[in-house]
Image (cartoon, rainbow, N blue to C red):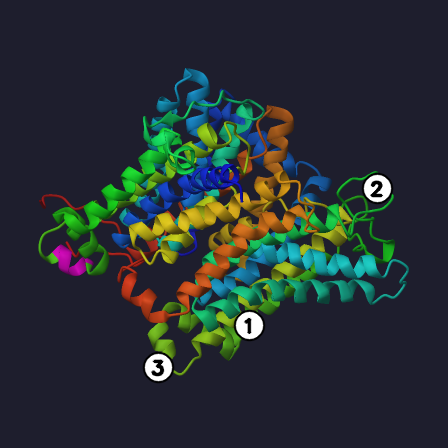
Amino acid sequence: MAPGLVSAVLFATIVAGTPLILTALGELVTEKSGVLNLGAEGIMSVGAVAAFAVTLNTGSPLLGIVAGMVAGMAMSALFGFAALTLQANQVASGLALSIFGVGLSAFVGKPYESQTLSSVAPLKIPLLSKLPVLGHALFEQQALVYFSWIMLAVVAWFLYRTRWGLVLRAVGETPVAAHAIGYNVLRIRYLAAIFGGAMAGIGGAFLSVFYTPLWVEGMVAGRGWISLALVVFATWRPLRVMLGAYLFGGAMITQMFVQGSGIRLDIPAQFLSALPYLATVVVLVLISRNRSTIRLNSPASLGQPFMPDA
Amino acid sequence: MRYLSPLLAVALMLVCGMVLFLVLGKSPVEGFKVFFIQPMADRYGVAELFLKATPLMLCAVGLSVGFRGNVWNIGAEGQLLVGALAGGGVALFFPNSHSPLLLPAMFVAGALGGMLWAAIPAWLRTRFNANEILTSLMLVYVAELMVSWLVHGPWKDPDGFNFPQTRLFQSKAILPILVEGTRVNAALIVALVVLIIGWVFMNRSFLGYQMKVSGQAERAGRYAGFSARRTVWIGMLVGGCCAGLAGVSEVAGPIGQITEHISPGYGFAAMIVAFVGRLEPVGILLASLLMALLYMGGEQAQQYLGLPFSISKVFQGLLLFFILGSDVFIHFRLRLDRGRK
């Protein structure tokens, strides 16, 4: 491949992977606290539409991102209220959040369909962006791409190098023990879920403000669910989330490059579009096949409600 | 409380809906009328209600069997689509058949198609331990793309002015209308029969009992020697079978051909129906009518209030939240507790 093409493919892969990294990192933290929030798809949708609406009306992408984040936090607080305060089934509550979020975003976003935002200029890192091949792909990206790398480091540092990260993991492994030594399990789980919501909201904002600069119903297109699968694929480890996200990003942009390259392939476009979804299934199978990997790495109390006995 | 909580959830949803109408600057009374009363104003409307409730009922009965056994099949939408393709395919491949067996054959094919699509996550779960929630959902997207490919490509109507749709089914492949002047068709009878079978299976069969035990107390089921694999297989296959039937009921019913828009999310709405109906056939019957009303109310709101159709999805999501939240009244008794720190 020509260096120009390598650079372009790498660039697009990173762009496509970024919303997945953001959302999956948030979900990772949520799941590490023992909460399974299946609502990522709904949160991303609402985050995307909130960010789009605010950016369109204020002209400020930054305010848009904040709006997406706040919307995501509100959505996950709603989930927290059902699943943590009212002790409803976490799986069902997450599904409810997904259905509600996708519906709400379609409803709220209707007036914004067929409007577009002006694209935001990328943030060039001085010197580094001049590197051959890698410079353009790695260091001429949107600010949120760098943000996703920073958050990766922050999450990894927080979970494994700080006291509160240890507490959060303890809550996810053995809530009873964490409760017994005086930590407020439900509050920690709430905070973790809201962090997850904020990240998924930012992930949605990236889609509608930077990735496609427009809003269409259903534009999240399963990325929330893929992010959930990514967490399993990464066996709940932050660095692997990034690896997985770029793998999926690559699967997602294949179609674009095959169609744009002028190579006449006798494959219907729908087959290529199905690739990321099929890849998700395959990857889940490969990782889950080894039961002990899953059992060793998944938080022990994942999905189980905890009720402090007063 | 078990039967009161769905009513409470519906009441909460209505209150929320009223507030929503207020926020949107519409009169809540007017909104309520347009959304919930107007669709049922005449005979045709009531018939439409049953027409729309049919696929919901079918999918929800199937899902309830899985949910009872803690098998989370959330891909009913995809199974519905593959069922519609399989059943519709039979209609398209026998365009000149006059056999009275054509419709039954379509239903069988649809059921098999749905089961095939559900068998994939079941196999991946039992053989490779892959989470059925994610795999079944991913297959929804794949099924949607498959429908899109077929109606844009190999199955496209050659005389259809390039519209992405198949030929219209021949008259023998269309479900007979039950009530003259409406669209309600024989699929309703199929759905009611499936409801009864579902009730017998869950309440009067040993297999159904095993599903319930495995779902409520997995260990108890394991100690009793009930196969966990079988629970997954039955839960998924029953769900797929029913969703496949629902798919046929749509393409051989009101649509009459295969298009890209076979289902407005019936497979997802059916999950709500199953929960609101307390995973029991009678409850599912009532809940499917309610959910059909939400769909029709959305259409009415679009027509008369100028609101987007997706408002019905907002209502659906709210309803599911409230039903899950109101379970707190089943699990706990609320008590005023004064004077304690």
Query: Do the residues marked 1 and 3 share a common chain?
Result: yes
Please tell me which of labels 2 and 3 falls first in the chain. 2
| Label 3 sits on residue | B223
Q: Is residue B17 left or right of residue B293?
A: left
Chain under label 1? B
Chain under label 2? B
x, y percent for residue B317: 47, 42
Indicate the quadrant where residue B76 lies.
Answer: bottom right
Disc 2 versus disc 3: nearer the observer: 2
Label 2 neighbourhood size at 10 Å, few (<14), some (14-19), many (20+)? few
The residues tagged by marks 2 and 3 sit, at their Cα atoms, a distance apart of 59 Å
Indicate the quadrant where residue B238 lies.
Answer: bottom right
x, y percent for residue B112: 67, 67
Query: What residue type is disc 2 on?
Result: Gly
Residue B160 badge: 2
SS assignment for the magenta stretch, majority: helix
Write the residue at 66% across / 58% down: B82
Write the residue at 53% across / 77% down: B205
Query: What residue type is disc 3 on?
Result: Tyr
| Quadrant into which the C terminus of chain A falls | bottom left
The residues tagged by marks 1 and 3 sit, at their Cα atoms, a distance apart of 22 Å
> Which residue is nearer to you in this view: A256 or A19?
A256
> Which residue is nearer to you in this view: B136 or A8?
A8
Q: Is residue A73 visible?
A: no
The residues tagged by marks 1 and 2 sit, at their Cα atoms, a distance apart of 44 Å
Query: What residue type is disc 1 on?
Result: Phe
Q: Which segment did they paint magenta? A: A175-179
